[in-house]
Image (spheres, helix red, strand yellow):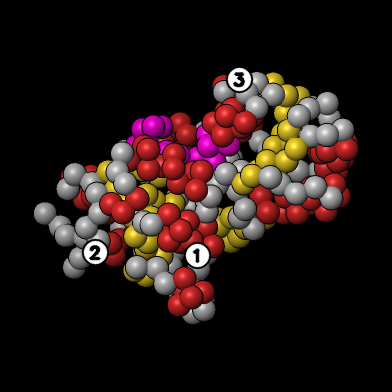
Amino acid sequence: MPSFRLPQRGWLFDLDGTVYRGDVLIPGAAATIAALRAAGRRVAFLSNKPLQTRGDYAAKLTRLGIPTSADEVISSSLVLARHLRTLDPGAPVFVIGEPPLITELQTHGFEVRTHHHVRWVVIAFDRTFDYAKLNTALQAVRAGARLIATNPDRTCPTEDGEIPDCAGMIAAVEAVTGATVEVIVGKPSPIILETALDRLAVPAADAVMVGDRIETDIVMGKRGGLATVLVLSGITRADDPRIAEVAPDAVVRSIGELMEP
């Protein structure tokens, strides 16, 4: 049986830039995750990207060679819907986001509207973001709506390079409305971490966060008391000065190096 760099029972993996990039699996990802599962470790996947349903993520991982169920995926869409339900169940919302997020909100009992007579504006990574959506958000805030968002990422890694992410939408809405997003539920928020640890059924001290972003994956893990592994297969480069500042427990080229040689 292979040994691993860290002994913890629970393993949380970021997806984009860590397990795959676009539709290309990171070398060693399938073998590493299979070995962890075979050794009795508990595995779950976290994604800040709200562009797919949990079922979509699970199907993609399975297609790429990592058999996965939807219950093993924790998405920012799921966490936002659950958290907003604790704040204002069934509230009317306007969504800057794509259909998978809208579906998740509707599944959790929210009324998704296309006009500004709402109690919340939900801001997410939205490749169809435009002036009309920005104006509706402005009018909603003017009428008293509050702001909540899925994730703080500035860019999203793809096989063709980085593309703008949710931070751009947040900045635009905050700039024109003068309002501030009250809650961002995705990494590095403790809200998504709590959901993930509940899924693993292990305490933070017995869990590892593996990801490619210092400001989300590693910072969340460090703040939450998890061991952390930074992979250099995504956004972060080896010469990034923040590595020394944040001090992850391990830095590897890819998750294929999580198994001891």
Tell which of 3 and 192 is nearer to you.
192
Drawn side of residue 203 relative to residue 216, left or right: left
The C terminus sits in image quarter: bottom left
Task: Report the residue at 83% width, 42% height from top.
Answer: 134
Drawn side of residue 105 relative to residue 46, left or right: right
Q: Are marks 3 and 2 in contact (CB under 8 Å)?
A: no
Look at label 2 and name its amino acid.
Arg
The vertical placement of 125 against 111, above or below, is below
Q: Quick one: label 2, few (<14), some, or many (20+) residues within 10 Å? A: few
Q: CA distance from mark 1 to mark 2?
A: 19 Å
Quick check: is 202 in the magenta stretch? no
Q: Which residue is mark 3?
A: 109
Q: Position of residue 259 (x, y in %)?
A: 23, 61
The N terminus sits in image quarter: bottom left
Segment colored magenta? 68-81
Q: Quick one: label 1, few (<14), some, or many (20+) residues within 10 Å? A: many
Q: Are marks 1 and 2 in contact (CB under 8 Å)?
A: no
Callout 2 secondary element: loop
Q: How many marks?
A: 3
Drawn side of residue 237 relative to residue 61, left or right: right
Quick check: is 72 in the magenta stretch? yes
Q: Which residue is mark 2?
A: 5
Q: Which mark is residue 214?
A: 1
The vertical placement of 60 against 3, above or below, is above
Q: Position of residue 161 (x, y in %)?
A: 58, 61
Look at label 3 and name its amino acid.
Gly
Callout 1 secondary element: helix
Task: Report the residue at 43% width, 54% height from top.
Answer: 224
